Image (cartoon, rainbow, N blue to C red):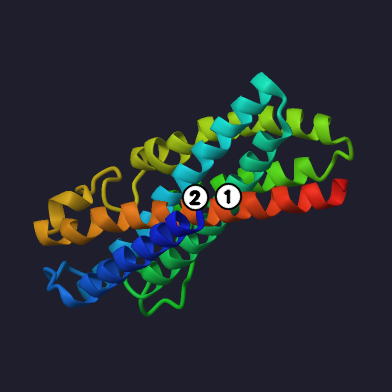
Amino acid sequence: MGRRKEVAIKSGIVLWMTAVILAAFVLDIPRINILEHTARNLYFHVPLWFALMAAFFVSAWQSARYLSTENIEYDVRASQAAIVGMGFGVLGLITGMVWARFTWYVGTNKWWNNDPKQVMAAVQLMIYGAYFVLRSSFDNERKRARVAAVYNLFAATTVPFLLYVLPRQFQSLHPGADGNPAFDKITAPVMRLVFYPAIIGFIAIFWWIYSQRVRLTLIERKLDHE
């Protein structure tokens, strides 16, 4: 990627997210019961999970490419996508805990109440945490890449079930769960004008961070071999 193109992309992401953040705090929103103005966290908390899912599926795709070619660059790309995805997941979990603390659990001093979606999200992060533990267990680069790639493909299959399918089967305070209306049923259309661009913006941030980490890691590998 040329220097000018890279600067243009980075500038575009910055401008896009600046517009999203401004709109998130300036546009008026409906006063949803209990949530009130904390509903604005929708623009940040949920897109972080979309970015995580994008990162984990990119990671799995790169692992599949490694298994078919045994090109170590694809293993580098897989691991870096997973690292960035974990970062978004941790932020998603934290923003969810803070949101719940000052809405559902206000007055209880609770930060965690074993809500099914909270638990499933934590399990998802632990599954990918095991991916990094597995990688650290091998000294042989090729063997590490091969075993990690197989595990990564398994881990990716759990994402839609743990983050979407299973939580909706249990009673939960989260919208869309058993007995609760989906968020699009209780939010005004104006919120979608910010929500969908926020998803695009956070995924773009993932891609930019991921690309930079891959470039840096490949450069470091090249210097080590020289």
Q: Is residue 83 left or right of residue 120?
A: right
| Percent coordinates x, y for residue 55 in the rendering | 50, 45
In this rendering, the answer to whether 206 lies above or below 150 is below
> Is residue 102 in sight in this rendering?
yes
Q: Nearer the viewer, residue 83 or 6?
A: 6
Q: Residues within 10 Å of mark 2 (few under 14, many from 20)?
A: many
Compared with 37, 188 (above or below) is above
- Give the SS element for disc 2: helix
Residue 109, percent from left and from top: 46, 78
Q: Residue 71 location in percent, x, y?
A: 71, 29
Q: Residue at x 19, y 48 (%)?
A: 181
Q: Residue 19 placed where, x, y %?
A: 25, 69
Residue closer to the observer: 46 or 31: 46
Residue 145 image-quadrant placement: top right
**Residue at disc 1, secondary structure:** helix
Q: Which amino acid type corresponds to the residue marked 2 in the rendered image?
A: Ala
Lateral position of residue 82 relative to residue 52, left or right: right
Q: Please, is residue 104 above or below residue 210 in the view?
A: below
Q: Which residue is mark 1?
A: 125
**Hey, which quadrant is residue 29 in on the image?**
bottom left
Residue 198 numbered tag: none
> Which residue is under mark 2?
121
Asked whether disc 2 touches disc 1, contact meaning CB atoms under 8 Å apart, the reply is yes
Q: How many callouts does the rendering have?
A: 2
Give whichever of 169, 146 is nearer the camera.
Answer: 146
Marks 2/1: CA distance? 6 Å
For badge 1, the amino acid type reads Leu
